[in-house]
Image: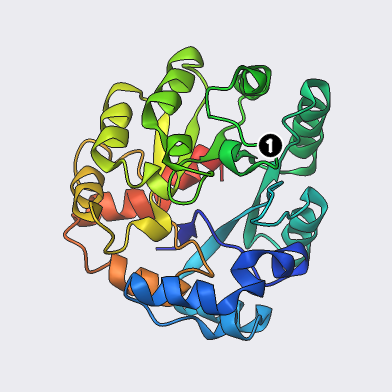
Amino acid sequence: MGIIDFRLRPPLRGFLDTLMYNAGDRRDGFTRTVGFEPSAAAQRQSMDLLLEEMDGADVEYGVVVGRRAGMLGSVSNEDVLHIMRSYGKRFVGAASIDPTSRRGACDTIDQAIGQGFRLINIEPGAYPVPMYADDRRLYPIYGHCEDRLVPVIMMVGGTAGPDLGYSDPIRTDRVLADFPNLKVVVAHGGWPWVNEILHVAFRRPNLYLSPDMYFSRMPGWEEYVKAADGFLADRMLYASSFPFCPVRGYRDWFESLPIREENRVKVMRENARVLLGL
């Protein structure tokens, strides 16, 4: 099939300084909590093992998301660009911005598009000074992305901020309503507000959902499955969230889900291919 994994963080450069790699015991604890055994590529921080795992799972592309975060750690656009250029076409980049500078953020977006990035990453609650998704300081940035026809991937769900309020789907709904031509990928699937974010997706055709590491056996996961095989089949995105879930193990689990084959192909490849223009 040639799967597109919409959230995959390789063991390279700035990623190695983030909690997902330098707090391995914590990461592996989460991996086991959601029903997987940790990936050897993650534990050994081996790029060769990751590429082998991607090949074994038939993952053609991995979406690499940089970040400018506080406690979670930061990964520069330069690091993501290095990964994109070092491994042929295996990785698609999502660039991050500094939300405190409107002009600087817009310049970064323009530069990133010119360099081949296909997404802009915005993580409101994870910034050093946390923001909500509908913070008015972000609105010029959303508007610029809408004008440039570049999708936004927004972390909304899980540990997306100091408290659950930063994953409030109502705030995401406001952004989607105010920027109807902006395509927004909700990373972490808005979890734990599963039914609420699915309702937002039902009423906002510009929302794409990527439950990734919260898809697997977490409370409410069955509703994601129903949506993937139903009204959201054209806007659900497959993502392992490696290194939190193993690339191969996640694929094997996902293919066991009761999703019709034509919809499985959409979720695991076609939706991302169209969204990213691949």
Relative placement, left or right, of 69 versus 63 is right
Residue 269 in percent (x, y) is at 42, 53
Kindly identify the residue that appears in the image at 49 percent across and 32 percent down.
Answer: 184
Quadrant in which residue 8 is drawn: bottom right
Residue 32 in percent (x, y) is at 38, 77
Relative placement, left or right, of 6 versus 190 is right
Kindly identify the residue that appears in the image at 32 percent across and 30 percent down.
Answer: 201
Quadrant in which residue 171 is drawn: top left
Does residue 57 show up?
Answer: no
Residue 167 in percent (x, y) is at 44, 38
Position above or below: 67 against 36: above
Position above or below: 203 against 232: above
- State the residue position of label 1: 129
**Callout 1: 10 Å neighbours few (<14), some, many (20+)?**
few
Q: Nearer the viewer, residue 214 or 3?
A: 214
Residue 240 in percent (x, y) is at 45, 63
Quadrant in which residue 75 is drawn: bottom right
Kindly identify the residue that appears in the image at 44 percent across and 35 percent down.
Answer: 165
Kindly identify the residue that appears in the image at 77 percent across and 22 percent down.
Answer: 102
Q: Secondary structure at mark 1?
A: loop
Relative placement, left or right, of 166 versus 72 is left
Quadrant, the N terminus: bottom left
Q: Nearer the viewer, residue 160 or 264?
A: 160
